[in-house]
Image: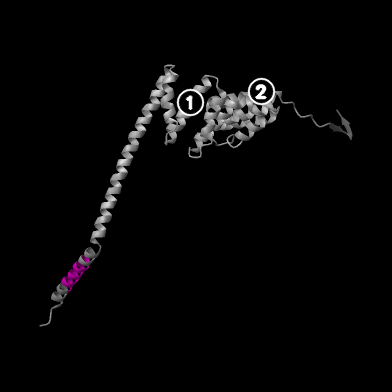
Amino acid sequence: MALTPQNNEAFLREVDDELRRDQALHVWRRYGKALIAALVIALAAFAAFLFWQHRQEQAAGREGEQLQSAYDALAANDAASAAAPLATLAQSKRDGYRVMAIFTQADVLLQKNDLKGAAARFASVAQDASAAQPFRDLALIRQTSAEFDTLKPEVIVERMRPLAVVGNPWLGSAGELMAAAYLQQGRRDLASQVFARIAADAQVPRSLRQRAVQMAGVLDEKTPAAPSAPATIEGKTTR
């Protein structure tokens, strides 16, 4: 007996559903174990990541407490108690805590007037390729400041040249060192230009800009004016 169009459509739908079930069953039989294994591995990896993240947060919290304890000791003029936690943090794998600890160690040495020791601590950060560039730049500035009296002016100028540019966050500090080196060389004109650059950059802290304006003004007043060209009247030169 021939099937009506309606019955024929229902029959085809049943065949299609049965075919889909057979295909799904075939895929499950062939890849089911592998899919389960992959799912288990993915869940295990995610759980391991969460555990690692938790441990990292705990470790960071402990290091934060160590740094705070060192600061508290220094605030109480107890440098000896601050030495141990700072030494530990100076070996940290976290850039922030490691750099802050080394900077603090250097500051303690500066208070003791140990400029050479402080410069060495700053240099260790400046030369640390794993540290973030802003940390390295600041360390180089502070190293140069500690070594200023022992360095040739041209060395200071070359160190600060990449940093004493408009748009660099350390323009103010690097520029002052660069200008001071130019003054040692007797180059008031170049020092004045650097101070003017600092004064014109709105990103430089206000106190540094005000000081730069004052210095630029003083240097401009003391810079000898260029001799005027001789005047010529009716073909004659007068002086």
Q: Which mark identifies residue 218? A: 2
Which amino acid, by three-letter code, is at mark 1? Gln
| Magenta residue check for 15 | yes
Name the residue at the bottom extreme. 1
| Residue at point 45%, 29% (across, down) | 100
Look at the numbered disc 2 and give the secondary structure of its residue. helix
Could you tell me if residue 142 is visible in this image? no
Image location of residue 230, percent across then percent down: 83, 31
Residue 223 located left or right of residue 85: right
Q: Which mark identifies residue 105? A: 1
- Residue 160 position by quadrant: top right
- Residue 163 position by quadrant: top right
Specify start and end residues of the magenta stretch as a single range: 12-24
Q: Residues within 10 Å of mark 1 (few under 14, many from 20)?
A: many
Q: For this rendering, which residue is in front, 132 or 121?
A: 121
Q: Residues within 10 Å of mark 2 (few under 14, many from 20)?
A: few
